[in-house]
Amino acid sequence: MSRVLYVYAKGGTALEHAFPRIAAHAELHVLALMPLPTAAADHWRPHCASITEATVPPGAASGDTVTDEIVRVAKEIGADAVLTLSEFAVLAVAHAADRLGLRGAGPAAAERARDKRLMREVWAAAGVPVPAFRRVGSEAELRTALTELTPPVLLKAAWSAGSIAQLVLRSPDDAATAWPQVAQALDKGREIRMSELYETGADRALIVEEIIEGSAADWYGSDSGKSSSGSEVGDEGAGGGHGDYGDYVSVEGIVAGGVHHALCVTARMPPIPPFNEVASTAPCVLSEARQRQIEEVAGRAVDALGLDTCGTHTELKLRADGGIAVIETAARFGGVMITRMVEEVFGLDPISLLVRELLGEEVAYPSRMPVSGRGAAASLVAAPADAVGTPWRTRPAWRPRQVEWDGIVTPGTAVEPVAAFDLPPDHPIPDYDPAAGAANWLGVLFVTAADAPTLLKDCTAVLGGLEEALNRVAPVEPGDRRRG
């Protein structure tokens, strides 16, 4: 039987979803570069033939050290493929696969898909539509960039993910306060182990770019009757609006031997300001013509990066003029429960498809990207703020399994807390930090509904009613309320 080495780091989909699908096609061995989650271990651990723990604190070792460990374990078990679903291990795994002579994204291409500075430079040269941008390595360079770009602009870490360390700036005077704010947000990212494992010093590599004005109303209004106010967008989408759908989408796909196969378009709910993601939803309700337009631009972006074999997750901005700008491409699948959404709605199992591709098996992809499916599903992130970014005023315990969801959502809609993303038991609800991204997460809810309109309505109801629902489960202790 073939053997797959899975390299674990924070991020990606839940192990209880991923591991059974990997193990269905190969003997699964795990190399953990950081402590494995204990949540749902009884569901994922039985699928593992072996587990090797080699905890590497972010920034504590060189990229070669991490790659050496992956290569060592892969040789020890006789791996036929090396795989990760974590953004932070993508580059190390690409280098390891290359050294082992196994299929993978390719080291140079993986770096282009990780470093947003390189990514945008490659796209600009290839004519892929991207916002104007500048590399910035100091507060002085940031101030200069703010005089050269048209505000508002977005400052973000070039190697970040999960909406961590993103700030909107409107004048050169903002540089002095923004620089330490980003550093503080990156420190929070390291605390929750959401930090690059291969590229040393990546945390301090920053980029600033113009914020493109988008309009969900101009796209969804004409196609589906769903609309959202126009809003601003950065690395993870739009901020400042709270209508039905956000003004950005993603294309989930696989690159197989350099050929991109789009699997579907997933829609977004408008993020919590400034750019903290709330939910991915499927199916996308845009017309087929609109989805084909999105598919074509995403394909150009992926092709320009020169990836060989990997999952892809490409985010694109929907502009008011009917055009599209590319936000980013990752050389891995979308995180949280996006792969499960694709499987639930479109009947395609991205993880199984990629494992088989990495093992050199013949894989049949859809002749055309599907644009409709069965039912609807969402990966919904819970944070201690409402849909417009107002922080919760109370600190209820995070006990989503005790919430009576039937009182919030439509009959027939199911809300399933995902154990892998739960806040640890008895961990206090954090103060909401707009720049901290995933560090604000309380958990992830997988929501299924009969159709897309019902799903959208119910996800909105969950966001609006979660604080009160949790308080009904475990009332807040006296004196344990937020100020203001």
Image (cartoon, rainbow, N blue to C red):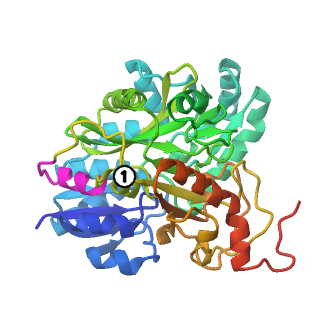
Answer with the quarter of the image where residue 291 lies: top left
Left or right, 117 with respect to 17, comes to right
Q: Name above or below for residue 228 compared with residue 64.
A: above
Residue 128, by quadrant, is: top left
Task: Please state which of residues 429 and 278 is positioned toward the viewer in this rendering.
Answer: 278
Q: Residue at x 58, y 49 (%)?
A: 277
Residue in the foreground of this view, choosing between 256 and 319: 319
> Residue 334: x, y in percent?
42, 49
* Mark 1 element type: loop
The C terminus sits in image quarter: bottom right
Look at 62% across and 55% down and name the residue there.
187
Q: Between residues 405 and 30, which one lies in front from this camera angle?
A: 405
- For image coordinates 63% across by 60% down, the residue present is 462
Q: Position of residue 480 (x, y in %)?
A: 82, 74
Question: In the image, is residue 245 above or below residue 12?
Answer: above
Which residues are the magenta region? Answer: 350-363
User: Magenta: predominant secondary structure element?
Assistant: helix
Q: Which residue is mark 1?
A: 374
Residue 50 visible, this angle: no
Q: In the figure, is residue 241 to the left or right of 196? A: right
What amino acid does circle 1 point to?
A: Arg
Relative depth, front residue between 64 and 342: 342
Q: Position of residue 169 (x, y in %)?
A: 72, 33
Q: Position of residue 215 (x, y in %)?
A: 60, 29
